[in-house]
Image (tube, helix red, strand yellow):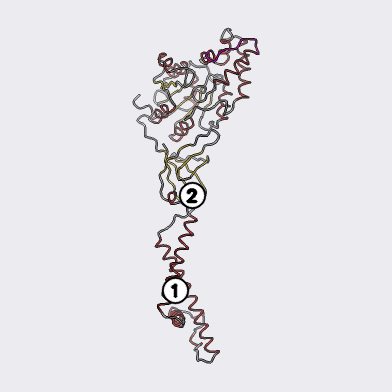
Amino acid sequence: GVSTRIRSSSMPVAPPLFAYFLAALALTLGLTLTLSTKYYYFRQIKSREEGLGGQVSMIPPKSTYNTKSLTQIIMGGISSIPSSPNTTFIAALTLTLTLTLALHLTCLTLTPKSKQNRALAATVTPLKTTNSRVFDLGSGLRLRKKITMNNKKKIAFCVANANIEIKNTLPKPDSEFKCVIFDMDGTLVSSTKLAHKTTNSVLEHFGHPHITLKEYGEGTKYTTPARLAWHAGLDFDSKQGIEMGTLFDQRIITMVNAVDVPLFEGITEILQNLNLMGVRMAVLSNASGRYVRRVNEAHRLQTYFKVQWGADDAAEAKPNPDGLLQILETLKVDPKIDRSVYIGDSISDGKAAQAAGMYAIGVSWGENSKEVLEKSEAFDIVLDSVEELQKLLATGGAGN
């Protein structure tokens, strides 16, 4: 979904072989000039010392050098070398070719691999990791997070001395979502085991019997205090339900980590792609706001979401649409004009989205099956896999 174009700016791109030949030829001529001049001086001085009639006076003072006198010195030096013209030519050519090869090898050593030098279009595949954003560019290149976004929605990476420009090449949607809001548990992360364990510890603390995993799942449609009161057979707004909810939040927040509350596979890629597309994102859960922010912090996702809310941050919990409407207002998105979507695994998520005038996507990898979600008629569409969700968001829901 994302392509790269690598341009070596601070690191040289290997020039054509002909350029090396010209550079080597220039070095050879320079060396020939220097040696011939020195040799001419030597021959003239030696001739005078040996009484051979050397005409040292023929050499003009350095301050009066001109083109003619320099040519005389060079030609005199070359003609004085005790070798034939052919030998001199062969020696100069050999030196030139040797320098050409040396320059070529040196530049190749200092230049990235050929596949990396050229304007290379390679697919960026985010590696499977939750602790750091790492991209595999192919050709042996891997990039770690150091991302800056400019107005043209491009990302600039700096690896070694090579400038790498990454452009979003996701298919242009017919009707792109401007805003995507996610539920947390059962949508972004799998928290069932930890939340079920914590729920039983709280119920036990207040003298209530444990519940099954199925009973826990049935209660997730409620806010945490109401859910615990329901599990204990109390009224939804009972005082003890509120106390149990407070204790539950205190305990589970201290136990949240990326291992015990893992992201569903493929979620990170979805968030990265939406971010590249410039889509505004947020989270709204019926859990507490502290819990939502702690989970995002554990997975380093907080930079993706402009708003991270729980039931205690909104005016009313889901299925009331107030929380979604407040977030849309904060993000300056009008659901009547701008296409926006809410994604969740509970019937209350779909009802809240419909009431807010948003596109409602149900996901069956959470607490409810596809049959249950479709039967509720609370969603515009119900998806079975993260891959399906990725395709739908990449095309802005076109055709649905």
The residue tagged 2 is: 162
Crowd rating for badge 1 (residues with CA inside 10 Å; few <14, some 14–19, many 20+): few
The residue tagged 1 is: 91
255 w.r.t. 206: above or below:
below
Q: Is residue 301 magenta?
A: no
| Magenta span dominant secondary structure | loop
Give the numbered dot on residue 318. Answer: none
Residue 155: image location, x then y, percent: 47, 41
Q: Residue at 44% of width from left, 42% of height from top?
A: 166
Q: Nearer the viewer, residue 4 or 243?
A: 4
Image: magenta residue range: 205-214
Mark 2 is on which residue type? Ala
Residue 314: image location, x then y, percent: 53, 20
Residue 90: image location, x then y, percent: 42, 74
Q: Is residue 212 magenta?
A: yes
Mark 1 is on which residue type? Ala
Q: Nearer the viewer, residue 390 or 226?
A: 390
Q: Residue at 41% of width from left, 62% of height from top?
A: 19
282 w.r.t. 49: above or below:
above
The kind of secondary structure element at disc 1 is helix
Q: Residue at 35% of width from left, 30% of height from top?
A: 174
298 w.r.t. 162: above or below:
above
Q: Residue at 58% of width from left, 7% of height from top?
A: 233
Quadrant (top left, top right, bottom left, bottom right) of the C terminus = top left
> Is residue 396 rendered to the left or right of residue 161?
left
| Marks 1 and 2, the one that precedes in the sequence | 1
Quadrant (top left, top right, bottom left, bottom right) of the N terminus = top left
